[in-house]
Amino acid sequence: MSDLKRHAATGATAVRLARRLLPSALGPGTVLRAMDRLEHTTALDGAIGVVRNAVQAVPLGPLRDVLHGRWLGHPVHPLMVQVPVGAWFSAAVLDLLPGQRRAACALIGVGLGAAGPAAVAGWADWAELKPRQQRVGFVHAAANITAVALYTASFTARARGRTGRGKVLGLLGLSAMGVGGAIGGHLAYRQAAGANHAEAVPDALEPGWHEIGPVADFPVGVAVRRNVGTVPVVVVRESGEQVHVLADTCSHMGGPLSDGEVSEGCVRCPWHGSVFRLSDGWNVRGPATAPQPSFETRTAAGRVEARFRDHL
């Protein structure tokens, strides 16, 4: 067989393998099917429950909102993982160059030092996810723990002068990190973990004022579900004709705020406890990192009207 035919055959084999493994016009592929099975399996639920309860029981106080990233306006875990990922990938590049042994070892150490805080933030977010997301997140964490263990072994080997062994362990750690990153991408983009689940509200509304019902239909201090156009909203009458309206779908994980508790000018999501200020939708307490879409209100002839508020 000529070299040209041999390369063509190799290329065709690679294409067939890629089609089998990855999504294509032919179907989801082996990898995506495996992720779908992982989402629906209950085999890990016992261990997940134990770990989730342990994470939620840690008395973090206000630090929990810091770990969620409420101060940043979105989850902080994806930002924090850039340090270990960047350090370890850079170390792999330096391993290919002569005379960079100490620099590569130093970068692995930096990555190990940054991995701990990133993991803590990730576990804090994971404990508030839905069951299918927690299953995927649990395996994502397992892959990352494997990467940390391999890089720890690599750092130890390098420190003892066993550079060749350290490079091999580092390559294995990089592979484990890549698998963990791919699973994390599925969790974030396929399953929308950490995304703002109320982001689409402004685009679903017609501009202007919308009638939502008579003032008398809304008891004082009680959350009532209504619709503004096609958008579900929670309506809370505070006193007299003062009425507050927020999008009903919680920005954190889509919980129904109309089933939540109203107290001290706020509504608390019944799913994960995020607290939003009724007057403007501000997320007073997490795990929600995004404020709730809110509406201006007015009363005309005893009927409440609402208009989307397009600013904080």
Image: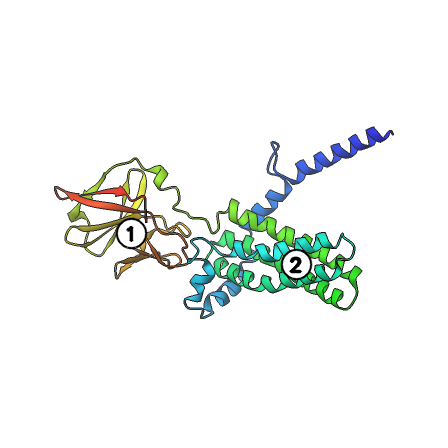
Query: Residue 90 location, x and y as percent?
Result: 67, 53
Q: In the image, 288: left or right of 43?
A: left
Q: Quadrant of residue 33?
A: top right
Asked whether residue 231 appears in the rendered view, the answer is: yes
In this orientation, which residue lies closer to the viewer: 241 or 39? Answer: 241
The quadrant of the rendering that contains the N terminus is top right
Mark 1 highlights which residue? 280
- In the image shown, does 278 or 227 lie closer to the viewer? 278
Query: Which residue is at the far right?
Result: 1
Mark seen at residue 147: 2
- Which residue is found at the position 24% from the left and 46% from the top? 296
User: Given the current orientation, which residue lies at the most extreme left position?
Assistant: 301
Q: Amino acid at mark 2?
A: Ala
Q: Nearer the viewer, residue 153 or 16?
A: 153
State the SS at label 1: loop
- Under mark 1, the amino acid is Asp
Q: Nearer the viewer, mark 1 or mark 2?
A: 1
State the colouring used for the structure image.
rainbow
Circle 2 sits in a helix, a strand or a loop, which is it?
A: helix
User: Is residue 47 visible from the viewing direction of this image?
Assistant: no
Q: Where residue 255 sits in the image (x, y, percent)?
A: 38, 51
Q: Residues within 10 Å of mark 2 (few under 14, many from 20)?
A: many
Pinpoint residue 97: horizontal percent, then vertical percent.
76, 52
Q: Residues within 10 Å of mark 1 (few under 14, many from 20)?
A: many
Is 123 placed above or below 16 here? below
Q: Position of residue 22 (x, y in %)?
A: 64, 39
Mark 1 and mark 2 lie on one chain; the one further toward the N terminus is 2
Q: Disc number at residue 251?
A: none
